[in-house]
Image (tube, grey):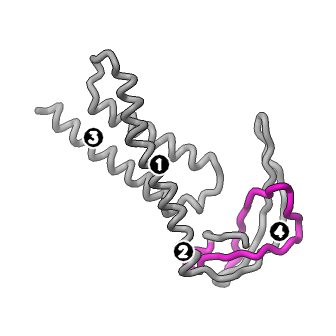
Amino acid sequence: MFQSNRRKKWTYIIIMFLLICCYIGIYHSHRYFGFDWLLWLTIAAGLALFYLSDLWLDDSKRWYKFKSFLFILCIGGPIGIFVVLMHKSFIEKQLANYGVPVKGIVTKLYMQRNKNSQTPYAIFNYTLNNKVWTQEVINTNSAIQVGDTLKLRCAKTDPEIFKIE
């Protein structure tokens, strides 16, 4: 009896944590530019799924690790795809419903170096709702230079949502 109540309680807690991760991934991940932040959110959700599989799968069986892997893959995969598609849809709807044209000025270029690669970035400023916003984008093929004017479409309700046109 005690084990069953404990299992239910932790199941609810983990599901709530996963729902919070999904909410952040769908509605707020555009605010946190960078692979690192999304990687940590994914790791946290993956660990929650691992603990959930540990709660519900019997670990005394021969195929425990394989069943855990399948559990995480079959539950986590669709959740991850759902979050990515919903985030993309959210951004598109915000730009379609509340998008306004804005001009941004490139103020800085920098190169992020990793062990085996380097990625060029451009930082630019734009004004919307009487506030100056600073964003950065990957500078594909180093096409953007300091001082360039970028044509943007920004969501008036959430100026951090933008698209270069």
For residue 129, side relative to residue 84 (left or right):
right
Occupied quadrant, residue 82: bottom left
Q: Secondary structure at mark 2?
A: helix
Query: What's the residue at 37%, 29% (across, down)?
Result: 68
Number of the front mark, 1 or 4: 1
Decide which of tag 1 and tag 2 comes sooner along the chain. Answer: 1
Q: Is residue 111 above or below residue 1?
A: below
Horizontal relation, residue 112 to residue 85: left or right: right
Percent from the top left, x then y, of residue 58? 26, 24
Q: Residues within 10 Å of mark 4 (few under 14, many from 20)?
A: many
- Amino acid at pointer 1: Gly
Q: Disc number at residue 94? A: 2
Q: Picture coordinates of residue 144 (x, y %)?
A: 85, 63
Mark in the foreground, 4 or 2: 2
Q: Which mark is residue 80?
A: 1
Quadrant of the snapshot with the C terminus: bottom right
In the rendered view, tell whether residue 24 sits above or below residue 146: above
Q: Amino acid at mark 3?
A: Trp
Q: Earlier in the sequence, mark 4 or mark 3?
A: 3
Along the line of sight, which residue is nearer the eye, 97 or 17? 97
Range of magenta residues: 131-159
Residue 73 vs 103, above or below: the answer is: above
Identify residue for label 3: 10
Residue lying farthest left?
1
Q: Earlier in the sequence, mark 3 or mark 2?
A: 3
Q: Point out residue 35 in the picture as x, y percentages from the top left corner.
A: 63, 48
